[in-house]
Image (cartoon, grey):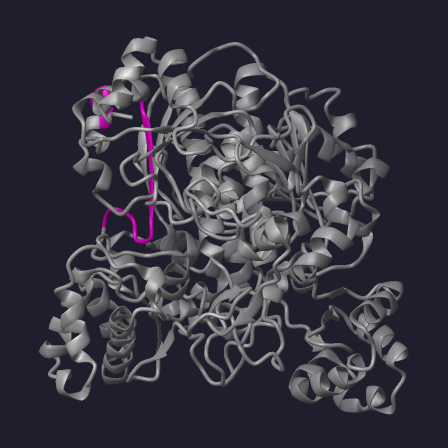
Amino acid sequence: MTALAGIRVIELANERINYAGKLFADMGADVILVEPPNGDPSRSYPPFLDNKQGPNRSLYWWHYHTNKRGVVIDLDDNNGLQQLKSLINTADILLEAEPRTRLERLGADYKDLAKTNTGLIHIAVTTYGRKNPQSDLPATDLTIMAASGPPWSCGYDDHSLPPIRGPQQAFHTASHFAVMSGLTALLHRGIGDRGQFIDVSMTAASNISTEAATYSWLVNQGTVQRQTGRHASVQPSGETQQLCADGRYANTGVPPRFPHEFKNLYDWLIELKLDSELPEAIFLEMGANWEGPFELSKIGEDDEITAIFSAGRAALQLIASKVAAQDFFTGCQRAGLSVGVVNSPEEAFEDAHFKARGYQVPVLHDDIDREIIYPGAPYAFEKSKWSITRRAPHLGEHNKEILDSQ
Amino acid sequence: MTETSFSPEALSNFRICDFTGQLAGAGATKWLASFGAEVIRIEDPVREGRWDILRGGSPYIDDRRGINLGGAYNNHNTEKLGITLNLREEKAKEILTRLIQISDVVSENFAKGVLEKWGFGYEQLKQIKPDIIYVSNCGFGHIGPYSDFRTWGPIVQAVSGLTFTNGLPNEAPAGWGYSFMDHTGAYYMAIAILLALIHKQRTGEGQWVDLACTESALSLHGPTLLDWTVNKNPTRREGSPNSNRNKWPAMAPHGIYCSAGEDEWVAIACRTDAEWNRLADIIAESWCQETRFGTLTERLAHQDELDAFIGQWTRALTKYECETLLQTAQIPVSAVLKPQERIDIEPSTQNWGLWPEATHSEMGKVRVDGQPVHLSETDWKITKGAPCLGEHTDDVLKRLLDYSDKEISQFHNEGVV
């Protein structure tokens, strides 16, 4: 059983919402991707199969359109428009990121569609929402991010370097909210039978996904400043990113705060025979034998507590400089410290933990007779099946089976 | 479902027995509460709910400090009810058992095994209520070699590759200046809860969802991972990452450039030759006409030089001057907005209603994050701030669990609540 079996989603192809469609499709919805006659532009986005450009070779396309069926419909043609309307009449959800007024001009907006399909849930994703003409301005993932806050908080201690954005994440964040609101409306419809229109603002989605940058301003008008590899902060904070012996980085997170953490760290230092290289080791031992709670607020005031906490940081720095980042990560975690290795995506993907959880998923591409390994489920359901049973569609691959049957 | 009547609120028929905290968990149930679900947060009275480090933490609205005055906690827990249960006491376990019996979902983001230790692991939950939905959310999930490892947002981002992909060549990873994966982990948790509720609505079955934030994070690399599995192209290579540039598709110019003023920046992207030509007309300098910048292929081959020229040009303008010029020419552009600018100056967020004022029992009215969607029939509502510690204990015990005033008073005296 899949959670969304029998739920039909019509997705008007657009890079801004392709991930939302995938999230629906991978949980069992019947997602029908509608493309214009020349195909969606993202069919030609890199990277490519065997690094060679060509039809059906875009790995970008493969990833974002798993489990979907594809049809070609020309919305600028009257027959095409009727085909689309008929198709939407069979659907539970319309997912689109069209220019703000296009569907209204075509007579295919929610108010038109709901006349014959009262249960329809229409999810419209635009830059600033359907009511705001700013949504008509050209925008990309980068400019949406810049307008919404994330880059202000991301970058380096050196502010002569530019703020940094996380690629594609404005599209992903908007897609998450498209799915959350679509599912919310589905649950509501499950009780009352009524569909509705959902207006998703991409800039609003990233605006409320910036943690302290937003609430520091809302609560007491503080402005965070970006710092290398750690939280942007109103008050500067200590570095947390550590270069390890193999040239890779680790994030040291929260340094030791409890006696058992100091003890584990001290024991590890001895195991590595590094205690003689750390004059402050004595303070680690003191931390290990500390009785009662540490008063963190006394760091900087109480000499003993300050020395113990400094020794914790110094020990982490010393060990990191002597071992590989992965060993630093697992060693710290075994000592009870919340530390992480800074993996590249492929290093993470090949890690034994994710393999053990079944995150590498083979998918047969019948058209090239090859099995391709895909990234797996973002959540592990006990009963609602997540799977990839179908590769991304070729252009118009399912025209006959879908449009002829209407 | 706890009731079957129709309601103008999308999720008012659902009750969540909520152990979540911080942002990765609390952010998920905030979504549900803002659409009318009855979210009952359960906290430990002995430790005054301090497991959630945000409870009494900064930012603060004034000089007052205290366990009820954390600004972030207030932001992430609007519209929820708050009760305390001292689960070291048998009577508290009885109360929790009764609460689970009338709930649809038990949600938590503790380290693996915490709820089990208290006697409320998934097996026990099913005995209490066979169709319960149990959604756990922790960094590495409850299954796998790292399931005992501890994380918070930056650690999830580091291990999953999201820190690595944000940065400039030959620099340390810039990563995220906030817990992107606490926000996004919360969104996945909300999606998981909603999907499980739909599954139950259609089949009557409950289930467990084991959410590993690192796995949700890995999913955000999509094409990068296929480029690895299919072509063995790694992201750890010379010149990579360079995250202000665009890979899918490649664009040039594409970046964040320095503007006039202190730490002021503007983002510019040219998707097509036509957009580049319009930008070149605006800049109107001789270098724009050089053949090395004539086509996308040429511009990509000389992107460092191109960026240096663009940066010289943007430096002479304020970010808003640049934005206006490029917008007029229909070129993708945006000033890099600071918190004050996007919250209080740029009108779109306020017009959207993105910063609703929530009333907190001790803090009074405070603006918080709203939701970036509007639903035509059952929109979200955020008017109540986060609960103070145990603020709704008596109400929930009396109204939902039928305890008498006398029993409740006894629970207080015995340290049960």
The correct choice, above or below, for A150 with respect to A311 in the image is above
For the N terminus of chain B, which image quadrant? top left
- Is residue B129 something that shows in the picture? no
| Residue B353: % across, % down | 71, 39
| Residue B87: % across, % down | 22, 31
**Which corner quadrant of the image does residue B116 belong to?**
top left
Side of B411 relative to B315 (left or right)? left
Q: Which residues are magenta?
A: B125-143
- Is residue B239 something that shows in the picture? yes
Side of B399 relative to B300 (left or right)? left
The correct choice, above or below, for B21 with respect to A243 in the image is above
Side of B163 relative to A274 (left or right)? right
Instruction: Tell me what residue is drawn at x 57 percent, y 65 percent.
Output: A167
The correct choice, above or below, for A220 with respect to B258 in the image is above
The correct choice, above or below, for B110 with respect to A307 in the image is above
Does B136 appear in magenta? yes
Instruction: Tell me what residue is drawn at x 78 percent, y 26 percent.
Output: A111
